[in-house]
Amino acid sequence: MATRFVIIGGGPAGNTAATHAARLGAEVTVVERDVLGGAAHLWDCIPSKAMIATGGAMSFSRRIEGMGLVEQRPVIDADLLRTRINEITARLQGQVTDLLDDQGVRVLHGSARLKGPHEVVVETADGVEELHADAVLVATGSRPRVPDFAPVDGRRVLTTRHAYPPAEMPEHLVVIGSGVTGVEFVHMFSSFGCDVTLIVSRQQVLPSKDPEVAAALEDEFLRRGVRLYKGARAIGIDPSPTGDEVQVRCDDGRAATGSHVLLAIGSIPNSDGLGLDAAGVLVDEYGYVPISHHCVTNVAHIYAAGDVSGKLPLSSVASMQGRKVAEHVMGLHTREHRHLDYDKAASAIFTEPEIADVGLAEADAFAAGRKVRTTKVPFSASAKALINNDPRGFVKLISDPATGVVLGGSIVGRHAAELISVIALAVTNRLRVNDIVESLLVHPALAEALADASE
């Protein structure tokens, strides 16, 4: 009898696990209560990047004089933008649905909970169904975190999921949270021409990133006129009596007033209501489901992947976790099998300029007392960057001074999210800087800066 594999959640982790396990011969059922493709993916990631692309086009239009063109001033149409986003997400959702169908995966639209270690109860519009599972994957994602002091109404006080685009375009947006999501929204709305204030609880934006990278982004924000409230933690949000303004109070006595407020202060895992306790699955104090390097929970046949697992909250990581789970369920881990190394996951921030990094960071190496070789090449020295009329940013490469093995890198600049793939491949496969130097790259191309940084 085929392995009966039940997956709760049809996001990047769930649908990748489903299609891969089905190809390997499993009998797969996916239960999804919201949207196939993943709520975080299709309600957050894809819409935000679509809006950023629109904002990027508007920003570029303001720089075209430097390319021998007459400057244009496009005006955003919120209805057309909303239609564009809906068309993109509908197409991607359709692709996921078709792929699952092609692989023979059964899809149930409803809510699932564990009744026991091998029993999954599914409530759909047609009734209740109980499934027996040889293996279960919990891949239920996360949702925006809303603090007690935030009177979210979806109109003036927004979470990220109210902003793709919002019901009305802000005149002055106050963003709370200077992590990846927060800075992307600052970039997005400032590109649209909105006034923006960013509440920064630390002394730099992107507190977990290389200070040099964060400084480059701060400089760009200040150039645009973004107000930065550094060292300020939001403690209260007060809508005005007239309803057309909102004030954010900070713990240092300062206050920021805008037409709208956007919360970008992280997410919480969707682990409640799943019956995990009935199956004996442990959940930590924050609601995450701890896993092993095989994505196995404390119960041998129950897995967790994606945001709910508490690992890197990236769609790429979730998809790879799903693939690894499918292989483990079907016994492939007993053969040659590479474990996921989260320290080697590439990530990107879709601001302008873009930011991307992978592997060991320079600051972390110094903090650990590790000797590294750091090389940095500015894009102002790149012919292609000058041709693009966008010489902002740099490539920074971290390598082992004794062996030349590439340990990590950061890129700030145009197409950083694409360029980081070269460094990610080098880090994952322990390539040396000479392997990059000796590659015959295209000229002119921004990737030449990678070879220059490898010299």
Image (tube, rainbow, N blue to C red):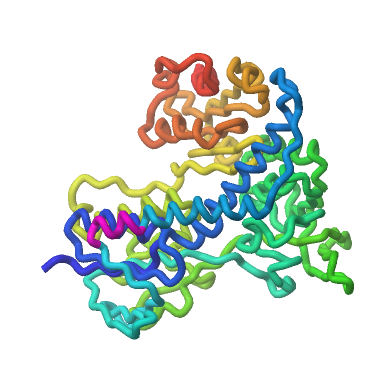
| Residue 238 image-quadrant placement | bottom right
Q: Residue at x 23, y 77 (%)?
A: 132
Q: Main secondary structure of the magenta part?
A: helix
Q: Position of residue 83 (x, y in %)?
A: 58, 54
Residue 325 in sight in this render: no
Q: Residue at x 53, y 37 (%)?
A: 417
Q: Position of residue 117 (x, y in %)?
A: 29, 78
Q: Is 428 located above or below residue 321 in the figure?
A: above
How many discs mark residues in the rendered view?
0
Q: Position of residue 340 (x, y in %)?
A: 36, 49
In this rendering, position of residue 328 left or right of residue 168: left
Compare residues 104 and 82 and report the one nearer the observer.
82
Q: Is 305 located above or below residue 273 in the figure?
A: above
In this rendering, position of residue 306 left or right of residue 108: right
Q: Residue at x 55, y 66 (%)?
A: 143
Compare residues 445 and 95 and report the one nearer the observer.
95
In this rendering, position of residue 54 left or right of residue 339: right
Residue 116 in sight in this render: yes
Placement of the N terminus among the 4 image quadrants: bottom left
Compare residues 399 and 182 and report the one nearer the observer.
182
Q: Position of residue 239 (x, y in %)?
A: 83, 70
Is 253 colored magenta in this rendering?
A: no
Q: Residue at x 80, y 36 (%)?
A: 223
In this rendering, position of residue 291 left or right of residue 362: left
Which range is magenta?
97-104
